[in-house]
Image: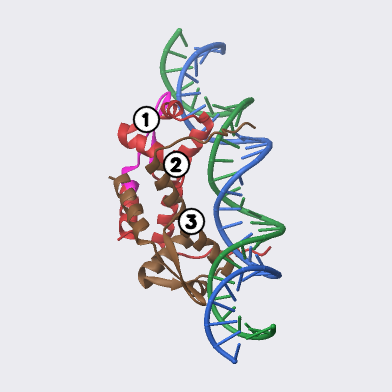
Chain colours: A brown, B red, C green, D blue
Amino acid sequence: MKRNLEPIEYKENTEALAKFAKALGHPTRIAILKHLENQSCCFTGDLVEVFPLAQSTISQHLKELKNAGLIQGELKPPKIKYCIHQENWNIAKSLFQQFFD
Amino acid sequence: MKRNLEPIEYKENTEALAKFAKALGHPTRIAILKHLENQSCCFTGDLVEVFPLAQSTISQHLKELKNAGLIQGELKPPKIKYCIHQENWNIAKSLFQQFFD
DNA sequence: ATTTCTTATCGCAAATATACGATAGATATT
DNA sequence: AATATCTATCGTATATTTGCGATAAGAAAT
């Protein structure tokens, strides 16, 4: 095999949009975000009860959403409260909007 | 290992949105779609010249976009003309719209 | 200090995605 | 029928994703 080692350079918006889309590319993560929109916020434990998935799996999905910038965690010891990251959410929203015209 | 063999059941819209998002979750596919929006249509060969990727790789990305329903291919022998699948495009658009409020 | 509660991380296994070259298929043209 | 052109598919290698249980990490309360 011979792979393209040097990654292709895309426009900034293209990369950003793909990154957001990738984070949204799993039904569990969509469902988590919908849940966050309804509840405005929630704890990891709440989600573990909602979805038939291991706690570690939920945590991993949350991590990806956080890495993508779509959510943020706030320390509420001993829990962690997760909310939509409103600023980045708006950025994602407008990127998708302008993408679809 | 013991995986959850029975897949989780999500709402239809959740699945649909995740599927579209997944297809959009790669910068090359975003770029292809942007190109299609500008040109309205194009051939596989055109894309091979635009992107520094093998023809087979481009073809694979097109296949995924087609499977997601975002594009459609029209036979224009000996070429194939790819266009946005307008109907599904609108569905995707409205799914993202209502997802982001 | 120890225990309790909550969440993150590690290590693993399996599945999927990404990329390539090579090859096959489909259709005009000669 | 043979050739040329264009695209899809196959086979392969590697990387990433997804999921689990087990364990670690953090903070509060006892």
Image coords of residue A45 (percent x, y) = 51, 74
- Say the numbered circle drawn on residue B63: none
Q: Is residue B78 magenta?
A: yes
Left or right: residue A73 versus residue B88 is: right
Instruction: Evaluate whether residue A54 shows in this view.
Output: no
Q: Is residue B29 magenta?
A: no
Of all residues, the one furthest to the left in this rendering is A101
| Front of the two marks 2 and 3 | 3
Label 1, label 2: how many angstroms apart (C-alpha)?
Answer: 18 Å
Label 3, label 1: how many angstroms apart (C-alpha)?
Answer: 35 Å
Judge whether A57 appears above or below C17 on screen.
below
Image coords of residue D6 (percent x, y) = 45, 24
Three-letter code for the amino acid on which mark 1 is drawn: Cys
Q: Which chain is home to disc 1? A: B
Label 2, label 3: how many angstroms apart (C-alpha)?
Answer: 17 Å
Please name the residue shown 35% across and 35% down the image. Answer: B36
How would you rate the neighbour count of disc 3 (Cα within 10 Å): few for under 14, some for 14-19, many for 20 or more?
A: some
Judge whether C25 appears above or below B16 on screen.
above
Please name the residue shown 48% across and 56% down the image. Answer: A67
Q: Please, what secondary structure does the residue beneath circle 2 have?
A: helix
| Front of the two marks 1 and 2 | 2
Three-letter code for the amino acid on which mark 2 is drawn: Pro
Q: Which residue is mark 2?
A: B27
Q: Observer-nearest residue: A66 or B7?
A: A66
Magenta stretch? B71-89
- Say the numbered circle drawn on residue A67: 3
Q: Which residue is mark 1?
A: B42
Q: Observer-nearest residue: C22 or A61?
A: A61
Please name the residue shown 44% across and 52% down the image. Answer: B19
Image coords of residue A9 (percent x, y) = 45, 35
Please name the residue shown 56% across and 68% down the image. Answer: A53
